[in-house]
């Protein structure tokens, strides 16, 4: 019994480490100040769900939820930087990994996500 628990924990730890390092390679986290400096020259994408986006989003952002990313990836250009954000930073990290696997290399995300954003916001 103890060995099976240790094996499961080992697998979980290995998976977490794998995800951490693959995300670290795929996306560069930016502070709000760094994000503001570059997002106007990039494709700004909010990967939250439409109801979250409609509740308030960064001015100029397009909504492509992470749940629709695979189907809508062709809407994102490969020749321009991609700036992603979600509520906390988890979903944007997952979206970045998906984009990275499809050949995107200039990917950034907002550290701490929208909940830490203090810049301009638009609501619908």
Image (tube, rainbow, N blue to C red):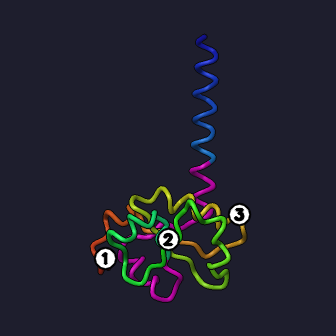
Residue at the image point whose x is 44% and y is 79% from the top: 61
Give the left or right position of residue 117, taking residue 19 as reference. Answer: left
Magenta-span inclusion, residue 40:
yes
* Label 2, label 1: how far apart the Cα atoms are: 18 Å
Sequence-first tag of 2 and 1: 2
Callout 2 touching callout 1 (CB < 8 Å): no
Which quadrant, please, contains the N terminus?
A: top right
Q: Nearer the viewer, residue 28 or 44?
A: 44
Return the residue nearer the eye: 88 or 36.
88
Q: Is residue 111 shown left or right of residue 120?
A: right
Q: Which residue is mark 3?
A: 101
Picture residue at 32% right of the left edge, 68% below the top = 55
Q: Residue furthest left?
A: 118
Label 1 element class: loop
Quick check: marks 3 and 1 in contact, CB under 8 Å? no
| Position of 54 relative to 5 (above/below) | below
- The magenta stretch is 19-44
Mark 3 / mark 2, whichever is N-terminal: 2
Q: Is residue 84 above or below residue 41?
A: above
| Residue position for label 1 | 123
Q: Residue at x 63, y 15 (%)?
A: 3
Residue occupying the point 52% across, 84% down: 42
Quadrant in which residue 94 is drawn = bottom right
Structural crowding at the residue carrying mark 3, measured as other residues with C-alpha within 10 Å and reported as few (<14), some (14–19) or many (≥20): few
Which element type, helix, strand or loop, lies under badge 2? strand
Which secondary structure is most common in the magenta stretch? Answer: helix
Q: Can you tell which mark lies on residue 84?
A: 2
Q: Which is more foreground, mark 2 or mark 1?
A: 1
Provide residue 52's location: percent of width, then percent of height: 38, 64
Secondary structure found at label 3: helix
Give percent across and percent down for residue 123. Answer: 31, 76
């Amino acid at each position: 019994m103890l060995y099976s628990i240790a094996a499961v924990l080992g697998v979980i730890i290995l998976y977490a480490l794998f995800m951490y390092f693959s995300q670290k390679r795929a996306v560069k986290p930016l502070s709000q100040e760094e994000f503001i400096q570059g997002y106007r020259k990039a494709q700004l994408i909010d990967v939250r769900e439409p109801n979250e986006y409609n509740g308030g989003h960064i001015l100029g952002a397009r909504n492509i939820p992470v749940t629709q990313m695979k189907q809508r990836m062709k809407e994102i250009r490969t020749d321009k930087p991609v700036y992603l954000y979600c509520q906390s930073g988890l979903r944007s990290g997952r979206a970045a990994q998906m984009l990275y696997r499809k050949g995107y290399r200039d990917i950034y995300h907002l550290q701490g996500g929208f909940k830490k954003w203090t810049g301009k916001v638009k609501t619908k």
